[in-house]
Amino acid sequence: MTEPMNRALLPAGLRDVLPGKAAFEAAVVQSLLGCFSAHGYDRVKPPLLEFEESLLAGAGTDLVAQTFRVMDPVTQRMMGMRADMTVQVARIAATRLAREPRPLRLSYAGDVLRVKGSQLRPDRQFIQAGLELIGPDTAEADAEVIRIAAEALSRIGVPQVCVDLTLPPLAPLILGAAGLSDAEKRAARHALDHKDAAEVAALPASVAPVLGRLLAVCGPFDAAFPMLEAIDLPPAAAAGRDRLAAVAARLRALAPEIALSLDAVENRGFEYHTGVCFTFFAPGWRNHLGRGGRYGGLAGQEPAAGASLYLHSLIGILPKPAPAARVLVPLSEVSRACLEALQAQGFVTVAAVAAAADWAAEAQRLGCTHFLKDGHPCPVVG
Amino acid sequence: MSASERTILALPKGRILDEAMPLVRAAGIEPEPDFDDPKSRKLRFSTNLPHLEIIRVRSFDVATFVAFGAAHIGICGNDVLMEFDYPDIYAPLDLDIGHCHLAVAAPVDTLAEDHPSRWSHIRVATKYPSLTQKHFAARGVQAECVKLNGAMELAPNLGLCRRIVDLVSTGSTLKANGLVEVERVCDVTSRLIFHRPSFKTRSAEMQGWLTRFKEATDARAS
């Protein structure tokens, strides 16, 4: 017989969000969505489950290993639980909203589920909130997505937003032009991802010098960009570099408070992106807060830019709001008018549902800050 | 000084430390005297720089401290980096110290009847289960790893398994235990590593350390 299980035990990476934190989380999501909506991004709400063919197509391909699947007993087809909402929003834009005028501005927030958490963040379920700008392939569109996501982050209390810009297609274009074997490309990718200068130096001589120089393009934007400009790039890569400069200039003009940095070879998680990408950081915080970039634009796909913010990275480090004053209303005093009046004063009301001998003690036991006495809220001492 | 402004440098205990300290000092970091006192039980050491502290931990833990951002800079071998493959570690500089390699070894007398090219499933004792598994998977061999934390060379002789994957520097430990190297897994040197988000958000300071260590490494090589 198996050991009896403690029923409080949850599967790895899943958790109960308890009072206080749950409300805070909802308020943060609301505030992010409010910021997106103020800039004209309309909320959409895709379902939790979809047929795996549509969920894992295109940009969804890199989520294959991260997606929980169940069989639909009705159609006998495989369904996937969303591991990322951007794929769903792109599907909505390409199908049901195909006839809407472009640029199409959409926002979303919801839980996503992943088969495995990462080594550093074991969560398998977390909230993703974001915005997508579908249509124009311009530097202004790239910059708008970054600017609004950064504004949303500062609105919820992130003191300084750092945006690390990158150009994921850059290294593949260079590797492709040099005609490397697949194994050599994989080795190059791994070396670049870990900024391993020794591994880069050991790559074939056709790419090692230029990749070595690219590796050094990392740091504050104004210091790093001239280094990128000095490198002789294939034409497609040079066009990407010009776009990067235009996006940075636009951000400087519209949101000078954002600290911009540049990393020419950052690629992880951006495998399906086709243009300027970015990661949000904040000084002293240990994880990135969100990311996004330009995707589509190839083989009949519509160009789009989007940003996603991850609540599990944010919630633990945001300043907590002060708890509201809570007043216990004794049985005899409970009336609709009385409760409404207290709530209008900003109190959270807790109406008694059973008699108590000492209302002050009862209020303290229930974690209330006040109790109602002769029609007036009295502070609980203690 | 707030925690967010302080910089923590994680150094590995043991063999690599002796080779690393000249570089650390050449980069302008001088730890407090307790650091060199073998009797001291301290784990954290102040330095001549008010915002920089040193912690001394096992080399496997250097990678973990840095990956989680508990330390910002570290020195550890690429054997450890490959074993964990943490996404949030950058290893931009090969310090050219701690040279050795990771190898598969087996008892001398098993080689004749058991050539490595014929292996399909093997049991291996190692400190590096993940790296070992990946290495063998890449050449189509299923490896069942037995995790040991030291004295790997004992395992074949006492019948725990027939092969080990371990660090080899001179090969004398293998020889003394009747083992012979049958396959080289990878070369190992120590790297200067950084916590990825810190490298982005405090890039001026982190780039500064990278430059100083690079100069120290170059000066030593010339």
Image: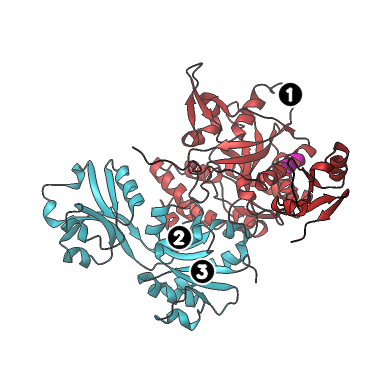
Chain colours: A red, B cyan
Look at discs 1 and 3 and give the one toward the viewer: 3
Residue carrying label 1: A100
**SS at circle 1:** loop
- Indicate the chain on which mark 1 is placed: A
Q: Specify the label residue B63 is tagged with.
A: 2
- Indicate the chain on which mark 3 is placed: B
Most frequent secondary structure within the magenta stretch:
helix
Residue carrying label 3: B9
Residue at 13% across, 57% down: B108
CA–CA distance in space, label 1 to label 3: 54 Å
- In the rendered image, the quadrant that contains the N terminus of chain A is top left
Residue B135 percent across, percent down from the top left: 32, 48
Q: In this view, does B133 lie to the left or right of A109?
A: left
Residue A33 inside the magenta-drawn segment: yes
Q: Which of B82 and A263 is in front in this view?
A: B82
Residue A226 percent across, percent down from the top left: 64, 57
Q: Do the residues labelled 1 and 2 touch (CB within 8 Å)?
A: no
Is residue A239 visible in the rendered structure shown here? no
The kind of residue tagged 3 is Leu
**SS at circle 3:** strand
Q: Same chain for labels 1 and 3? Say yes or no.
A: no
- Indicate the chain on which mark 2 is placed: B
Instruction: Report the span colored magenta.
Output: A30-34
The kind of residue tagged 1 is Glu
- In the rendered image, the quadrant that contains the C terminus of chain A is bottom right
